[in-house]
Image: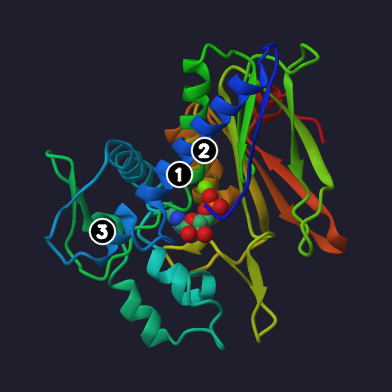
Amino acid sequence: MGTSYSIRLAGARFDRRELADLHADVDAALAEINRQMSVWRPDSEIARFNRAGADEPVALSADFRFVVRRALELAEASGGAFDPTVGALVDLWGFGPDGRPPAAPSAERIAAVRRAVGYRHLRLMDDGRLAKDVPALQLDLGAVAKGYAVDKVAALLRGRGLDDFLVEIGGETLAAGVNPSGATWRVGVLRPDFGPAGTALQGIARLTGGRAIATSGDYRNFYRAATGEIESHIVDPRTAAPVGHAVASVSVLADDCLTADALATALFVLGPADGLPLLAARFPGVEALFLLRRENGRFEEVATPGFAGAAGYAP
Ligand code: AMP
Ligand code: MG
């Protein structure tokens, strides 16, 4: 997944050997998710699917199938703002294996690539195989795989009888129970400054009960184009170009990390004007905090009415 993970456990005592076993199990679970869903590995199931032709269905492992099913539901429910088939556009704009383009892609090139984008081109069949009706379509679960992996690791810890933990993969976080001081886990929301990865915080949330917070933003994976414009790794499926607006980051609180991860990406595309009504209408119980970039390096917070209370958030 091109990132790091951390797990904190409280209230449990392990000897060295039990801890090493647990560590090995977590690594194996994550390796298995990579084997299924990493587009960076030519031998993964997703890479095989992406190379397959139209109407050449590919069998998926159970976890992969589950993630695809949820991704399709969330694509539909977000009106296509989250779309797990934007991969070819993400590559075209310089965030794939080929790296940065020398200049912005031409309108013709964008139009051509766009023909191979759209979650409606995917079909999850009753027998569990996945098919596409355009051969060039590229499935990209980069916006949900980390969240899913967090859920998977949390389930593994629960299966070991653990109740108090914090799981974090590349910033996507889930917490249960309490921290070593017996208090609710504290999770920082980063200030979305451009530049070297900083640790300055915009605020602190409190997380427990198996709920999750995921964040999408433009401040970690971006480049400055020749035009001076910042291009970042989230593509607006409506324009086929990187999202370009005042939103610097979106943090989403949900009952599972896959949902939080997908919706953070969707809300980054939509911004608060379209995103807040969507949440209110379609996602009861999901809360979000937008950080908008303002003059003089300041950030303005715009949140759902319930975010501060539900996330115990303080700036
Ligand atoms: P995240 O950091 O969770 O927002 O995921 C961003 C990653 O998801 C990008 O690096 C792309 O691989 C992919 N992606 C970009 N735009 C979208 C989109 N609109 N819907 C779904 N996935 C996307
Ligand atoms: Mg995401």
In the rendered image, the quadrant that contains the C terminus is: top right
Residue 270 in sight here: no
Q: In the image, is residue 2 above or below residue 104?
A: above
| Residue at which label 1 appears | 31
Q: In the image, is residue 163 above or below residue 297?
A: above
| Residue at which label 2 appears | 27
Instruction: State which mark lies toward you, 1 or 3.
Output: 1
- Establish whether ligand 1 lies closer than 8 Å to the Cβ of label 1: no
Point 81% across, 14% down: residue: 181
**Mark 1 near mark 2, Cβ–Cβ under 8 Å?**
yes
- Residue 56 falls left or right of residue 219: left
Mark toward the start of the polypeptide (3 vs 2): 2
Depth check, front residue: 20 or 44: 20
Mark toward the start of the polypeptide (1 vs 3): 1
Residue 295: x and y in percent read: 83, 62
| Residue at which label 3 appears | 49
Type of amino acid at the residue the image marks with label 1: Ala
Residue 138 in sight here: yes
Point 71% across, 49% down: residue: 291
Q: In the image, is residue 137 above or below residue 28?
A: below
Type of amino acid at the residue the image marks with label 2: Asp
Tell me how far mark 1 sits from mark 2, CA to CA.
Answer: 6 Å
Q: Element at badge 1?
A: helix
Point 53% across, 83% down: residue: 101
Q: Element at badge 2?
A: helix
- Residue 76 falls left or right of residue 2: left
